């Protein structure tokens, strides 16, 4: 395998794994928050900001993976 081909495979693997984890985390986080709001609508104000913060932190992991891909 040539070095350029190996480099492209490494980039594809890094962004694939680095994007899959945060995508699953954000989906689960928002799904559980919506389920909680559906059961208790008065909790919307208490859940919204922590949900957004959690989604932002999970998205930061995907951005780190993107930075790693650009540095490879």
Image: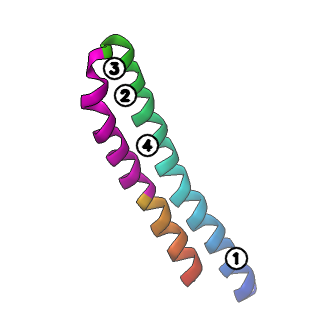
**Mark toward the start of the polypeptide (1 vs 4):** 1
Please name the residue that numbered disc 2 is placed on: 33
- The verdict on residue 53 being magenta is yes
Identify the residue shown where x is 49% and y is 37%: 27
Q: Nearer the viewer, mark 1 or mark 4?
A: 4
- The verdict on residue 69 being magenta is no
Identify the residue shown where x is 31% and y is 25%: 44
Please name the residue that numbered disc 3 is placed on: 36
In the visual, does 39 lie left or right of 62? left
Q: Are marks 2 and 3 in contact (CB under 8 Å)?
A: yes
Q: Helix or strand or loop: what does disc 2 sit on?
A: helix
Mark 2: few, some, or many residues within 10 Å (few <14, many ≥20)?
A: some
In the visual, does 22 lie left or right of 39? right
Q: Main secondary structure of the magenta part?
A: helix
Q: Nearer the viewer, mark 1 or mark 2?
A: 2
Segment colored magenta:
42-59
In the visual, does 70 lie left or right of 24? right
**Mark toward the start of the polypeptide (3 vs 4):** 4
Marks 2/4: CA distance? Answer: 12 Å
Q: Helix or strand or loop: what does disc 3 sit on?
A: helix
Please name the residue that numbered disc 4 is placed on: 25
Marks 1/2: CA distance? Answer: 38 Å
Identify the residue shown where x is 35% and y is 19%: 37
Residue 41 in the image, given as x and y percentages of width and height:
33, 15
In the visual, does 32 lie left or right of 15? left
Q: Nearer the viewer, mark 1 or mark 3?
A: 3
């Amino acid at each position: 395998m040539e070095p350029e081909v190996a480099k492209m495979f490494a980039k594809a693997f890094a962004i694939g794994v680095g994007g899959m984890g945060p995508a699953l985390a954000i989906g689960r986080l928002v799904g559980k928050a919506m389920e909680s709001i559906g059961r208790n609508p008065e909790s919307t104000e208490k859940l919204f900001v922590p949900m957004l913060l959690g989604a932002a932190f999970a998205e930061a992991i995907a951005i780190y993976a993107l930075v790693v891909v650009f540095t490879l």
